[in-house]
Amino acid sequence: MAWLTNTQIAAAFDELGDLYELDGAIIHRVVAYRNAAKAVREAPVSVASLAEAGRATELSGIGRTFEEKIVALIRTGDIPAARKLRDRFPPGLIAITRLPGLGPKRARQLYDDLGVDSLEALRAAVEHQRLRPLRGFGPKAEANILAALETGAGERAPTRFPLDRALAVAEPLVHALRDHPAADRVELAGSARRMVDSVKDLDVIATANEPVALARALGALDLVESTQSAGEAGARVMTHGGLRVDLRIAAPDQFGNLLQHFTGSKQHNEALRRAAVRAGLHVSEYGILHDATSHTDRCATEEEVYDRLGMAYIEPELRENRGELEAAAAGRLPRLIRESDLRGDLHSHTVASDGRNTIEQMAVAARERGYQYLAITDHSATMGFANDVSPKQLERQIERVREVNRTMEGIELLAGTEVNVLPDGRLDYDDALLAQLDWVIASVHSSFRMSQGAMTERILSAIEHSQVDAIGHLTGRMIERRPGYSVDVERVIEAAVRTGTMLEINANPNRRDMSDPHARAAAEAGAMIVINSDAHGIESFRVARYGIATARRAWLTADDVANTRRWEDFARLRKRARG
DNA sequence: GCCGTTTTCGGCCCGACTGTTTTCAGTCG
């Protein structure tokens, strides 16, 4: 039996949830499947091995029944209940439930009454006006279904934008609205405010002395392509880049409630409300209703919202229902790392490999950011990168770095490399050459489709190597483009802790690798984290903010991250210095 | 199906909108 990834288990739970929903199960049972899928997907360890050990129930949302289903999936490749339900509901029905306006109930009605079992059959039924006699379907419904079929909805997943592309729109947009005379307060909300990996749309919350004027001002911005609606309550527009923006305008005394609500996450808000209900309070975007008095408290700030619920303020990056509510109630939230805590960057490229700037230019740019140290880590020799650095070239590069380091004031330059980890686990510079360097990052850049076992051994070999200081971009994922390679992160973390090998959070907004769940697991296990830009040019140091965002989402403090240290302290943390 | 400061049963977040309805179910965020 092939090894089962968390992604595969989560997909099986999502499918079974969809099938039960079509089957008419009570919604809470369906929600349990969706929650379980999310818990599995975000688990930093292999849920399959947890289930084998009878420990999967340690995950919140996984009970005995779900654990048994995971074990069945491992042993037989399927879940019996799913097999049964698949016979009753054709796969095309799921696609129909994905159409806007059609959910499981109405899709089921179409299937039972008309035999509609696919998007094509649905189109034919609408065109022959066979929906008319059905209760709940009228001419509007027909038109909406046709429109949805035209746009291809239901056939493909909606486009998601990596965070840097979303913020490139959101930040100028928020600033422009703040500058408008009709505006009072304007804040970015939604998943972009939580600094997630990728976003579907943008949410902006404002207060205004002239709401309609502000709503119209949004539609008039250069980056807006079209306006869907604009009025007293706000506006919905589409940008030229295809990103939808929702502006909501609040009464000043409810701004905190609205901002909190639309910052989410959904899971955070649901858990927040469950906790509130136990105290006789009902939280919504309009305020906090007290059962006892039937009075609704309105909050002008988010701080008030959390305060009235007996909690410390929770930073947006933590709002994922991963324990932040309990920590806030107990006053045990971490003091999260900030971008200004970084004192160095340990992963950068120059013209020697695939970078765009020289050693000197990179050093000056790093110094201008206030960094005390920078490692120059060009790619190593093999595996088809353009402009790889041969062993001879690396020796010359070491000399150049040392020379610039001697002549340049105010920054410590490290002669380093980003050395490839070959498929068999060896590195592609020999040990004697690596020993001349001040800093070595080892990364996987080839043969991504290895089995999880082989990939894990490959990376463990690099971790066990005495000259390797850190592992670069642990899973190789590219956000919204490809999943990471399959690796047993739990074993990697254990080995990293034992050997003193640092684990990188690569800050490139297309990578953010380690992911926030992996980074949190690594830090909790006691691994040293290093946040690196992987800059290929002087303008790329600014991506550090995305590495910091991932670190904050992983609950990291400045202490958890090695390159918040002064150079003298960082130098002593390197594996080579620890003997 | 999960879960427990309502603890092994009985709940499970909240509100808006839509199209259809004659008081509301389903869908969505």
Image (cartoon, coloured by chain):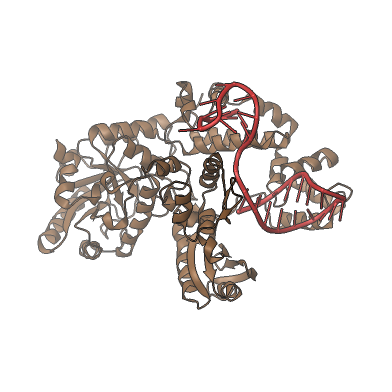
Which is nearer the eye, A155 or A420?
Answer: A155
Which is nearer the eye, A90 or A315?
Answer: A315
Which is nearer the eye, A461 or A61?
Answer: A61
Residue A231: which quarter of the image? bottom right
Provide the letter of the chain coloured brown. A
- The answer to whether one can see residue A231 in this image is yes
Residue A65 horizontal side relative to residue A438, left or right: right
- The answer to whether one can see residue A476 in this image is no
Residue A227: which quarter of the image? bottom right
List x then y, in percent, for residue A435: 15, 42
Image point (50%, 36%), residue name: A39
Q: Residue furthest right?
A: A133
Residue A126 horizontal side relative to residue A575, left or right: right
The number of discs equals 0
Residue A374: which quarter of the image? bottom left
Q: Is residue A143 above or below residue A436?
A: below
Q: Residue furthest front?
A: A293
List x then y, in percent, for residue A202: 53, 60
Q: Residue furthest bottom?
A: A181
List x then y, in percent, for residue A2: 50, 27
List x then y, in percent, for residue A390: 23, 50
Q: Residue furthest left?
A: A406
Residue A186 horizontal side relative to residue B10, left or right: left
| Quarter of the rendering occupied by the C terminus of chain A | top left
Image point (56%, 68%), residue name: A240
In the rendered structure, the colour chosen for chain B is: red
Residue A434 horizontal side relative to residue A177, left or right: left
Q: Is residue A63 above or below residue A171?
A: above
